[in-house]
Amino acid sequence: MEHVPAALGLAFGLANALAVVLFYRATRQSRRTLYVLLVWLLFQAGLGLSGFYAASPTTLPPRLLLALVPPLLLIMGLVLTRPGRAYLDGLRPDRLTLLHLVRVPVELVLLGLFLHQAVPQLMTFEGRNWDILSGLSAPLVYLLVFRRKQLGPRFLLAWNVVCLGLLLNIVTNAVLSVPSPLQQFAFEQPNVAILHFPFVWLPSCVVPLVLLAHVAAIRLLVRELRAGRPQG
């Protein structure tokens, strides 16, 4: 994408790195998690740089599924298996909350990509994407819940559910805007950015980490409320 400034790619790369670091901290510095993430990022970078995703966007099944499906299967495995649930139970809810800060720079990058005709307007906060509200509210929620303890687990659970809805909204619109046989929106300016490096890391890494943060937090909070324990 020669028409997209390198600065946007750099900014997104830094946002992706922030997501990885914050999730790594949420895992209590699990080296195994970090190694898996780094290998996955390198694999997706190779596919993006080779033109694998952009070369044949109309093939069936869509090649972009290789970026989307493995993380979703991994998240399902974590939820449905005993070792996976044990892993989720070991995550830090305070760090999972802070991870959503990454949604602010991501939304700003998306706006820049729209201005350079690499994503449709509906993927920005000028269109159908209000995901930036999750990122802007994350530090305040962290402060009130974990630092000042003025709000409890019920509020944190409700916030996670609402923000999960915002995430699913933009993911649905983004996937249905990619040039493919499944495209439903934005035919005049489709979502082509995520077919290229480094923006392929958005569906393959950033979005799955944000989704996993919500899934893990909701699971922890539901269990906590059922047990009647205060949020720590």
Image: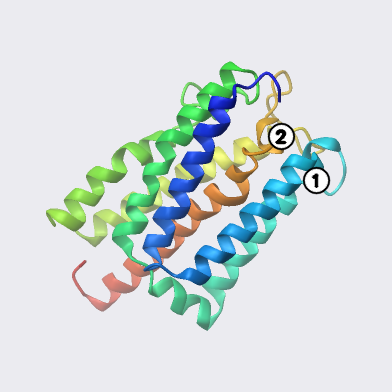
Pointer 1 local density, CA inside 10 Å: few below 14, some 14–19, many at least 20: some
Q: At which x and y percent is residue 16?
A: 51, 45
Identify the secondary structure beneath mark 1.
loop
* Amino acid residing under circle 1: Pro
Identify the secondary structure beneath mark 2.
loop
Residue picked out by circle 2: 178
Q: Is residue 180 left or right of residue 6?
A: right
Q: Is residue 129 left or right of residue 63?
A: left
The residues bearing labels 2 and 1 have C-alpha atoms spaced at a distance of 10 Å
Residue located farthest toward the bottom when viewing the structure as drawn: 82
Q: At which x and y percent is residue 15?
A: 47, 40
Q: Identify the residue shown where x is 59% and y is 72%.
A: 77
Q: Identify the residue shown where x is 50% and y is 33%.
A: 11
* Amino acid residing under circle 2: Val
217 to 78, vertically: above or below: above
Q: Nearer the viewer, residue 127 or 6?
A: 6
Q: Is residue 130 visible?
A: yes
Residue picked out by circle 1: 62
Q: At which x and y percent is residue 207?
A: 54, 48
Q: Earlier in the sequence, mark 2 or mark 1?
A: 1
Tell me, what colour scheme is on the image?
rainbow
Q: Are marks 2 and 1 in contact (CB under 8 Å)?
A: yes
Q: Please give the label number shown on residue 145.
A: none
Q: Identify the residue shown where x is 56% and y is 75%.
A: 80
Pointer 2 local density, CA inside 10 Å: few below 14, some 14–19, many at least 20: many
Q: At which x and y percent is residue 94?
A: 29, 59
